[in-house]
Image (cartoon, rainbow, N blue to C red):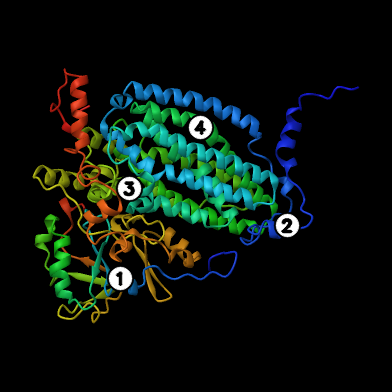
Amino acid sequence: MSVNAIGEYRAKPRDLQANFNGMQMLYVHWEKHLIFCSPFAFLVAPAMTFAAFVEQLLSDAIKAHPDSARVDFNEAVWTLNGERFVPDYAASLEANGIDHKSMLRLNTPGLNGVQGSCS
Amino acid sequence: MTMQKKKLGLKDKYRYLTRDMAWEPTYQKKADIFPHEDFEGIKITDWDKWEDPFRLTMDAYWKYQAEKEKKLYAIFDAFAQNNGHQNISDARYVNALKLFLTGVSPLEYGAFQGFSRAGRQFSGAGARVACQMQAIDELRHVQTQIHAMSHYNKHFNGLHDFSHMHDRVWFLSVPKSFFDDARSAGPFEFLTAISFSFEYVLTNLLFVPFMSGAAYNGDMATVTFGFSAQSDEARHMTLGLEVIKFMLEQHEDNVPIIQRWIDKWFWRGYRLLSLVGMMMDYMLPNKVMSWAEAWEVYYEQNGGALFKDLERYGIRPPKYQEQANIGKQHITHQIWATFYQYSHATNFHTWIPSEDEQQWLAEKYPDTFDKYYRPRFDHWQEQHANGQRFYNSILPQLCQVCQVPALFTEPDDPTQLSHRQIVHEGERYHFCSDGCCDIFQNEPEKYIQAWLPVHQIYQGNCGGGDVQTVVEKYYHLKNGQDNLEYVGSPEYLRWLAWKKLATPQAPAGTGDRRDAA
């Protein structure tokens, strides 16, 4: 369907990648760690390597959680936009197929949040 | 000479002063005068079937309202002269007023604008008069709310510049975008959204909590405003029911259109009210009732009876109401946890509920609070005690439709985040729920333009790249004064000082510091 309007109605998305000054949006949700209330919204450079993203941005974002010290990224299970995803840590986000406004889910088997409550 | 009757009968007076003031155009086409009446697809065959819900003429309206105003402002004056703000239950209560003044009062103004427009666009004189009356009511409400709360602005932080904040502060885009969505729809959808779904179906979940909350917490100014608005609200509810029945009775083709609007505006209203639920369960020092209890009474029971009544028109209860019924056990805890961690960017303070309060929450939410949410608060309390009060330094992902951070969990699994995403014309979009995703898919052109605060900050449109600059320069909040944790805030310290003067037998520092009152 489309919007019901008094005349022809055209609209442009407000959040096109072009509006982010060469950067892009990337969302990450750490499953079973709902102390972080919603997925993180990161502003990232598409050329950044996945390794740099994890080391510089993601690790810092989750460091307040007591489970964060026990995260083994080699064991982590990822999904990218709903599909199973095996990252190439040396490659850029772009080369990993992580496009603008992509959503990553991080699952860390064995880690179930504060007191196992998924918090 | 025969004497003319001096006074008109009530019925005649009503007719002369309302519908009789309309006329049939002779040199312009009706469609040109009322250009917004047809495009939504609602078919009206006979405007004369419209039953005027208010039965009030302007002269009587002014008289009633003037009497109410006189009483209302006398109480405001008395409240100010007696330093009424020092008699509230606890300074934490004022945070509920900050939420109300920045989140709700500007919506009253939006309602004034919306009803003014709807009143201009209907060709039926009865509907025009009703919308005009409600527009004036809404304008009165925004004014009296501002006046009720202005006294608090002299003594507490975060109440200044409320309309500026409404347009800019991240979480206030939730109420703002709700109303902008309604106001940018056609006049019939606007009335379905605001008069019916909001005023009729959900209003008790907004007004009862805030006004009873004020009464329970010693806030005479706000509670008096509530009483003064009550008779207006009753009229607004009557209009909400009249408009929906009128549209449904006019033509059967209207039924599916109205059903889709009911589905949409129920879900939008439900998401918006999660802020009110948080206020009830977490911000009121003296609780009125829990959000879950309020939802059961005002939606499940009252709403259930209403939709039973509408069944004969072919209307079913709103889609996803079952998800809302499940959500009543969860959403307030999830929302408070969100504001707790993003308190550095809000105009009100947050805190960990006291042990007594957590006990109350556990009793009211026996299946969810201890199991899912207490561990979160325990952990944060411990961190705070160690000098590491938790703030989330990364901005949250927002739902493209309701603009609430994507913080809700799956209806069938409270340990799993509820998240939906779709690609529309090559762009990715993210949602908190099926309800919001459906709304997007019905009218994508509308929501692809959403002004999402998080994306706007990252695009560089909010005065700076880091949160503190945005908060100070763009939101006009004073860092360390208007925002952050309640315990230790200037407001908290001031409250302790006041109470020490007022009650020397109970000096500050005894017992739970958060419950110093």
Q: Which mark is residue B330?
A: 3
Count the marks: how many? 4
Q: Amino acid at mark 1?
A: Phe
Observer-side mark, 3 or 2, equals 2
Q: Which mark is residue B230?
A: 4
Q: Amino acid at mark 2?
A: Lys
Label 2 secondary element: helix
Label 3 vs 2, first from the N-terminus: 2
Q: Are labels 3 and 2 assigned to the same chain? A: yes
Number of other residues with Cα within 10 Å of mark 2, as a class: few under 14, some 14 to 19, many 20 or more: few
List x then y, in percent, for residue B377: 20, 45
* Of A71 and B454, the residue lying toward us: B454
Label 4 vs 2, first from the N-terminus: 2
Observer-side mark, 4 or 2, equals 2
Chain identifier of the residue bearing label 3 in the image: B
Q: Which mark is residue B426?
A: none
Q: Going by the image, does B202 lie left or right of A54?
A: right
- In this view of the protein, can residue B372 be seen by the observer? no
Q: CA distance from mark 1 to mark 4?
A: 47 Å
List x then y, in percent, for residue B82: 33, 20
Q: Which mark is residue B30?
A: 2
The residue shown at (51%, 36%) is B140
Q: Quadrant of the N terminus of chain B?
A: top right
Q: Going by the image, does B278 lie left or right of B224?
A: left
* Of B145 and B207, the residue lying toward us: B145
